[in-house]
Image: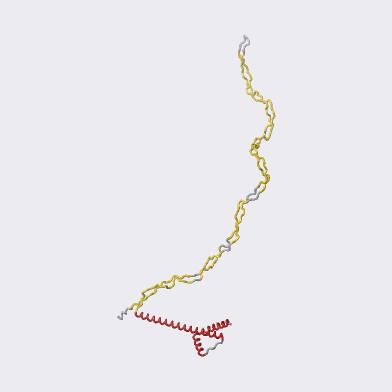
Amino acid sequence: MKKQIIAIALILLLASVFVLAGDVDSTSDSSDSVATTKPAEIPVGENSEKKQDESSKKENHKRDETNGKDDFKETKFDEDKKKDSEEKKSDETHKKCKLVCVKFKTEKGKCLKHEMKDQEKVCIKHKTEGEGTCLEYKHSKSCEKYSKPTKKCIKHKSEKVCQKKKTEKVCDEYTTKKVCTRHATECDQYTTKKKCETVSSTDSYSKSGKSCKNVKVCAKEKKVCKHYKKEQVCKKHKKVSKCIKFKTEKKCIKHEQTKKKCLKFKKLKKCIRKSKGKKVCIKHKLVGGKKVCKEYEKKKVCEKKACEKKEADSYLM
C-alpha cells in the first residue's frame, strides 16, 4: 500500500512541474492570490499530509528561481555602469594627452599551418600471407639403388685341385718310316795314281831299279746302308698341360640365391598440415582526429601605453 501511495505522489509532482515550467511570474502571482482568497483545505490521512509537503516544496523552488534572476540582473547592470565610467575617463584623458605605446609584446595571430592529431589508422585493403605453407612434415625413406641378387653356397665338398702345371709336347698323329740299322762305306769316285816300287836283283848278273805303274785309288767315299728296319714316327705334335703338384680345396655343390639389398637410400618428406594464412593490411587510411594549429602568425601588440601632452596649435600661439 505504501509503495502505491509513493508512486502516485511522484506522478503528481512531475505533472505539476511540467505545468508550472511555462511562465514563472504568472504562476507566482496566481499562487499569491489563491493564498489570500482561498482558505487552505485540511487534508485527511497520510495522502493529505504528503500533498501539503509537495506543495510547500514547489513554492520554495519558485521563490529561489525568481531571486536568482533578480541577482543576475543586478550584477549585469553594475558591470555595464563600470564600463561606461571607464570609457568616459579614457575619452577625457585622450582629449588632454596623446596615448603612445611604450612596451610591445608578440601574440599569436592567425594560424598559418595546421596538422591533424589523434587520428586513428584504419585498414581498407587486406592481403593473406603464408597460405598453403607447410607447418608439419612426415619423413620417410625409399630405396634409390638395389644390389644384384647373388648366389650363396649352402653345401661344400673337398676336392683335389692342381696347384702347379707343366706343358709338354705330345704326338697327335703317327706314321711308319724306314730306319737304317747297319751302315757301310763305299767309294763314290775313283782316280788313277802313279805308284813306283824299287826292284832288287835276285841274280848277280841282273841290275837293281825302279818299276812304276798306274793304280786306281778312291778319291771320295760315301756311307751306304746295308740293312733297313721299319719304325713308327710322329707325324703331328700337340701341347698338353700336365699337373705336377696337387692341393685340396672346398668346392660348392649346392647354391641358394640371396635377396636384393638397398645400396642407396632417398629421403622423402610429405606435408601433413598446411597453414590457412594470415591477414595482413597493405593499405591504411587515417580516420577521425582533430585539427590543431602547428604554426601561428606572430602579431605585434601594445602591452603598455603612456600619455604624452599634446602640443598647442600654431594659430593659437
Residue 128 placement: quadrant: bottom right
Up the image or down, 90 lies above or below 241; here it is below
Where is residue 35? Give x, y as percent. Answer: 51, 88
Residue 169 placement: quadrant: top right
Identify the residue at the far left of this view: 317
Identify the residue at the far bottom of this view: 37
Up the image or down, 101 lies above or below 274; here it is below
Tell me the quarter of the image containing the C terminus: bottom left
Tell me the quarter of the image containing the N terminus: bottom right
Instruction: Between residue 264 and residue 38, name the one nearer to us.
Output: 38
Identify the residue at the far front of this view: 45
Q: How many marks?
A: 0
Where is residue 225? Give x, y as percent. Answer: 67, 26
Where is residue 162? Give x, y as percent. Answer: 65, 39
Where is residue 40? Give x, y as percent. Answer: 53, 88
Instruction: Between residue 23 and residue 265, name the one nearer to us.
Output: 23
Up the image or down, 37 lies above or below 279; here it is below
Side of 314 where 32 appears, left or right: right
Side of 290 where 270 appears, left or right: right
Question: What kind of colouring is applied to the model shown?
Answer: secondary structure
